[in-house]
Amino acid sequence: MTTSWVGLAAETWDCLGGDAPQADVEWFRALVEAQQGLALDVGCGTGRVLVRLLRAGLAAHGVDTSVDMLTLCRAKAKRYGFEPKLFHQRMEALDLPARYATILVPCGSFTLLLDDASALAALRRFRRHLAPGGAVALTFLAPFDPPAPVLGRWTRRAAGALPDGSEVTMDVIVDRYDAGTRVVESRRRYTVVRAGAEAREALLVDRYRWYDVASATRLVEQAGFDPPTATGDFTAEPVAAGHGVLVLLARERD
């Protein structure tokens, strides 16, 4: 597992929509409340979900592989009067001094694990960190839509502005999709322009793994969890074609 959410990518994350409230926040909040205990936000980034949980009066920690993202998360939480415990670790090597009633993996971050071995290692680490009765919630983007149809085309994914007025754009291209390993290789191009100043640019390479419902469910069960519930788009509906997000909720096998 690698991270490319550093530098300009981290700096512009929030202004490009990365901090916008989404349907998952309310779903995660309800789950954490129902679990009645400490939560862990895996891949917490700048704190979109984590800080909102804290503001709702819930107890939560965060973990991420990007020091830059964690720095921004800490500053954001502090603006709201919080100093959460944040950890710089990889999910497949998770080793934290706490046990959690809920472990959340928002934004499809689990797909950054590129093979079964690392994915199983992460799931087993999650199990070790669960308190009795704990639950793990995993999210997978586009579970019915392999990325092959969008190969080789730059797409404007987001645009926004930094606090200093600089205009920011992010364009994405999918370069390669290996149907055997389900690994996607893509690039993100960031451009920051401010009147009277030289433009800043960054080109970052991504690799992630695409999951359908069957492959994600199989790994969760192989890691020692009960068959997970599979719902779509942060609703109570069973996941089906037309849903853009698969949500797996798993509990440890009795």
Image (tube, rainbow, N blue to C red):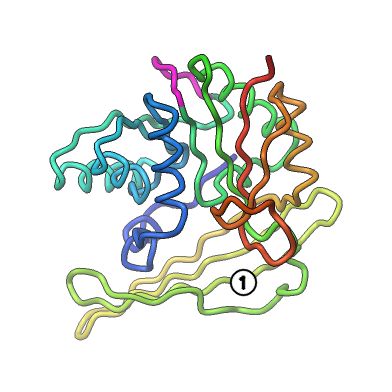
Q: Tell me if residue 98 is in the magenta stretch.
A: yes
Residue drawn at (38%, 26%) of the image:
36
Compared to 197, does 63 lie above or below?
A: above
Is label 1 in a helix, a strand or a loop?
strand
Residue 245: name its quadrant: bottom right
x, y percentage for residue 94? 51, 24
Q: Is residue 196 left or right of residue 49?
A: left
Secondary structure, magenta segment, majority class: loop
Residue drawn at (76%, 74%) of the image:
149
Q: Is residue 181 left or right of residue 21?
A: right
Task: Report the amino acid beneath label 1.
Answer: Ile
Task: Name the image quarter holding the N terminus.
Answer: top right
Q: Nearer the viewer, residue 237 or 153?
A: 237
Q: Nearer the viewer, residue 160 or 246?
A: 246
Mark 1 = which residue? 173
Bounds of the magenta segment: 94-101
